[in-house]
Image: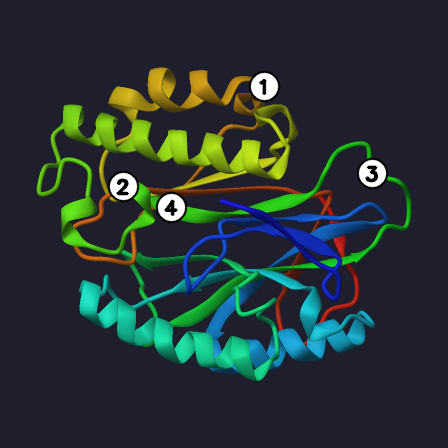
Amino acid sequence: MQLIDNPKGHFQFLSGIAPYSSGAIAVPGYEIVHVTLQTPLPYRQGFALIDQHLRAQDRSRHALCGIELRSPKPFTFEGFAGFNQGYQHVLADWDLPVDGINPVARTNVAPEVGPPAEPSLYAFSYTTTCDTPTDFPTFVIAGAGELRGAALSPDAIVRAGETSAEALQAKAAHVMQVMQTRLTGLGTTWSDVTAVDIYTVHPLQPFLAATILDEMGPAAVHGIHWFYSRPPIVGVEFEMDMRAVRRQIRLTKGVSSCPANQ
């Protein structure tokens, strides 16, 4: 992975694969704000909402650095590739790629209960100027499942076809290593993390303490946020993403200009 400057967006990002970067970190003088939609929107409508919100905050489209999607069900590998093509066209229409490389981190999971009828926007992150200096870096790290080398192939799945407690622990351990690698790539540590999201429909308790919380170190004080959801591809069973932010906003309708510090 390579840390790449995105001067138009006022952040740096870790190179990933074509559909998404591995993570993004705000440059000095800027911070990343995380926004959650109370009601997810079909993702193309969601991009229109993002555009409106950024305009209201006097920010350009290039400030967009993170996307969180919800899908009706996991895709096949072929279906995921097809979805990614349409998604990448949206980013290209927004002129977001930097020298042909996608700067926007992404998570895309399928809720097991109450899934949307079509791929939908659940949350997004963007950079803005700091009102006051930050005493820690703000960043977002893209979702990752138990795929070796981030390869989108059935052969890359760790312990493919297994869902025993032992297999899930191995999957979680692999994903934790991916998270560590991305933290290191951004020049950050677990002590900077403010939120960890886990996406799986399988029990966490057998390995939560030893494999996840112990490895999180000081970030464990914040716990984890478990979404009862499946990763975006059939056969992948465990996914995580992370972030470090000072400000979070919840949009209940339309555009909000009143961030809530959390």
Residue 82, label in figure: none
Dot 2 or dot 1: first in sequence order is 2
The reply, left or right, for residue 46 in relation to residue 204 is: right
The reply to whether discs 3 and 2 touch (Cβ–Cβ < 8 Å) is: no
Q: Residues within 10 Å of mark 2 (few under 14, many from 20)?
A: some
With respect to residue 96, does 22 lie above or below? above
In percent of width and height, residue 189 lies at 60, 27
Which residue bears the numbered disc 4? 144
The reply to whether discs 4 and 1 touch (Cβ–Cβ < 8 Å) is: no
Which residue bears the numbered disc 3? 134
In percent of width and height, residue 23 lies at 54, 49
- The answer to which quarter of the image holds residue 17 is bottom left
Please name the amino acid that badge 1 sits on: Pro
In percent of width and height, residue 213 lies at 44, 21
Q: Nearer the viewer, residue 255 or 148?
A: 148
Residue at 56% in and 84% down: 93
